[in-house]
Amino acid sequence: MNALEPFLEGTVRTATPLAFAALGETVAERSGVINIGLEGAIIAGAFGGFVAAGTGSVWFGFLGAGLAGMTISALFGLFAIRIRADQIITGTAISLFALGITATLYRQMYGAEGAALSIPTMGVVEIPVLSSIPLVGRAFFAQPPVAYLLYALVPAVWWWMYRTNAGLGLRAIGEDPRAAIAAGIPAARFQYLAVLFGGFLGGIAGGVLVIAQAGSFAEGMSAGRGFIAIAIVVLGRWHPLGAAVAALVFGAASALQYLFQAMGWNLPYQAFLALPYVLTLLGLAGIAGRSAAPASLGRWQDQH
Amino acid sequence: MPEVALVADMLVRATPLILAGLAVAIAFKGGVFNIGAEGQLLAGAAAATATTLALSGMPGAFVVTAAAVTGAAAGALWAAIAAELKRRFHVLEIISTIMLNFVAIHLVSYLVRGPLQEPTGIYPQTETFPLSARLPVVLPGTRLHLGFVAAVLIAIALAWVMKNTAWGFRVKAIGSSPRAAWSTGAIAVQRSSFMVFIVSGALAGLAGSIEVSGVTFALYENLSPGHGYTAIAVALIAALNPAAVIASGIFFGILQTGATAMQREFAIPSSLASVAEAALILAVLSVAAYRGRRLPGLPRKSAA
C-alpha cells in the first residue's frame, strides 16, 4: 500500500502534461499536420507560464503558458502550412528555435544563475467523495485543479471531433485534403486552427511542469516530452481518449521506479531517467503494423 | 589571441560539425530522417574513451586509430537500433532517434559517474588521456588537430562516392522517390536505407571519437553542446552536398566561436547561436518552398 500510492500518484503526475500535449497534437495530426515543433511549444509554455505566474496568479500563468505555446506553433504553421515547407524539418527547427530563445531570454531576464527563482505554485485541491475512493481516489482527485481541466477537456475534444460537423471536416482533411477542399472545407484554415489549438495545449503542458510541479524554470526542462507526446499520439491511435489512456500507461510505466525502489531494487538512477525514452521505443515497436495514421499525415505538400 | 590561433579554434570547432553534418546530409539524401546524430556522437565518444583508456600504454598511433574505429562502430550501432526498429516495426525514425539521444545522455552520465569515472571518484568524468593517445596537432602552437584534416578528406571522399558509385546513385534514387526506386526492381530499398542509417551513425560516432581524442581528452557530461542538432543546419545549408558541408561546417564553427566570445566579452547568451541556426534552417526551407521544389533528397512521403 505505501508503495502503491506514490506509484499511482507518480503515474498521474507524469501523465498530466503528456496528456495535454498529446491531446492537442492528436487534433493537429487528424488534420494531416505533424507538428514536431511540439517540444518547442512545451518549452515556450514553460517559460511563458513562469513569466506570467510571476505576477502572482497561477491561472494567469497558465494563460501565459498556453499563449506562448500557441505563438511558437503559429510560427510553425506559417512555415509548414502557409509556405508548405517540409513539416518534419520545420518542426525540428522550431523546437531548436524555442529551446534557444527561452534559454536566451531566461539568462537575459534573470541572469545566468537564476536558479533560486521560484513562483507561486498551484496547490492540490481535493474533490470531496471522489478523492476518498480507495487506492485511485487520491491519485486522480487530489491533484492541482489544472488536472481536472484535463479530465473535462478529453471528452470535450472527443465529442467535438466525432459528433460535430467541424470535427468531421477536420478528420476529412487529414484523410484526403483534396476531397475535403472539393467539398468546400477551408482546409488550410482548419489546419492552422488545429495547429494553434495543439500549440495552446502544448503550452499548457509546459505550464503544468512549471506552475503545478517544479515551481521554477530550467533551460531545456521540456526534456523531450514533446517527442514523447507525439509517440503517445501514435500509441493512442490518433484518438483523444486513446491519447489519454496511452499517457496514463506511459505515466504508469515511468512511475515503476517508485515500485522498484520500494522493492529495494538498486539500479543506477540514470536507468530511471532513461526509462521514459526506452519505454517510448518499446511502446512504438509493440504496436507495429497496427497504427492507423491519417492518410495524408505529414504530406500536405504532396496533396496540393 | 593571435589570429592564427583564433582561426585554428574555429576549425577545431568546425570539425565535429563537418562530420556530424555529413552524417545528417547522407541520411537526409537517402530519405532517412536521422535526428539522432547527437546520440550517435555521444555513443562514439563513450566507446572511443573506453578504448583509449583500456589500451593505455600501447603505441599512440594504434590507440588513436582503435579509438576512431570503435567510436564509428558505436555510432553505427546506436543508429542501427533506430534502423532496426524502423525495418521491423515501422517505428518513425524521427521519434526513435530523438529518444535514443536522451538515452545516450543518461548513458554517458552513468559511465562517468560509474565504471569509467576517474580513480579518485570526485569528478564526474573519466581519466584524462595520456599525451600519446591524443590526436597530433597539425599546426604547431594552435589546437588544430589531425581530426580536421580527416573530416575534410572524408567529406571529399563521400562527395566522390555519391557522385561516381552505384551506391551513391542508389541512395539518391531512394531519397528522391522510394517507390520509383523500388519499382525498378534493381534496388533493395530496405537494405539500402538500413545501410544509409549505419553509415550516417558511423560518421556521427567518428565525430564523437575525434572530439575526445582531439579536443576534450576525456569523457564527461555535456561533452557536446548540441553538435548533433547544429549538424542538421550544417547539412541543410550545404543543400545535403558532402563537399559543401566542409564550408557550411566551418561557417557554423565561426558562428559558435563568435557566440562563445560574445558571451565572454559582452555577456550575450551563447544560446542565441541555436536561435540563429534555427532561423537559418527556416530560411533555407522557405527558399526551397518558394522556388517550388523540395530540398534535394527529402523523401516524398514522411507519414508516420
Image (spheres, rainbow, N blue to C red):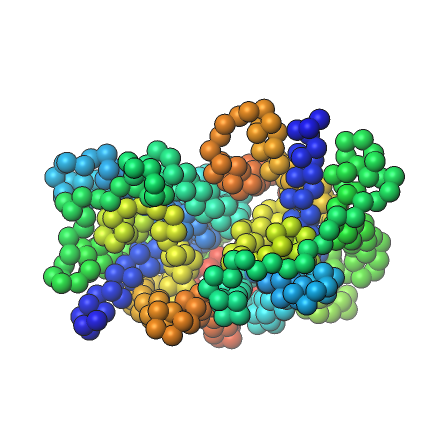
**Residue that sits furthest to the right in the current view:** A129
Q: Is residue B291 above or below residue A227?
A: below
Q: Looking at the picture, how far across and down is residue B7, in whole percent?
A: 22, 69
Quarter of the view holding residue A285: top right
Is B93 placed above or below A288 here? Answer: below
For the point 19% across and 57% down, which residue is it? B145
Tell which of A301 and B44 is nearer to you. Answer: B44
Residue occupying image coordinates x 63% and y 40%: A250
Q: Return the residue nearer the eye: B269 or A68.
A: B269
Q: Position of residue A187 (x, y in %)?
A: 70, 67
Residue A61 visible, this angle: yes
Q: Position of residue B211 (x, y in %)?
A: 28, 52
- Is B117 left or right of A164, judged from the image as shown? left
Q: Quadrant of residue A61?
A: bottom right
In the picture shown, does residue B222 fall above or below A203?
above
Residue furthest out toward the front:
A116
Residue A206 falls left or right of residue B29? right
Q: Give the vertical position of B100 relative to A54 (above or below).
A: above
Q: Quadrant of residue A211?
A: bottom right
Q: Quadrant of the N terminus of chain B?
A: bottom left
Q: x, y (%) of residue A96?
A: 49, 62
- Front one among B149 and B22: B149
**How many labels sit on residues?**
0
Q: Residue at x 27, y 49 (%)?
A: B212
Visible residue check, residue B285: no
Left or right placement of residue B226 versus residue A142 in this view: left
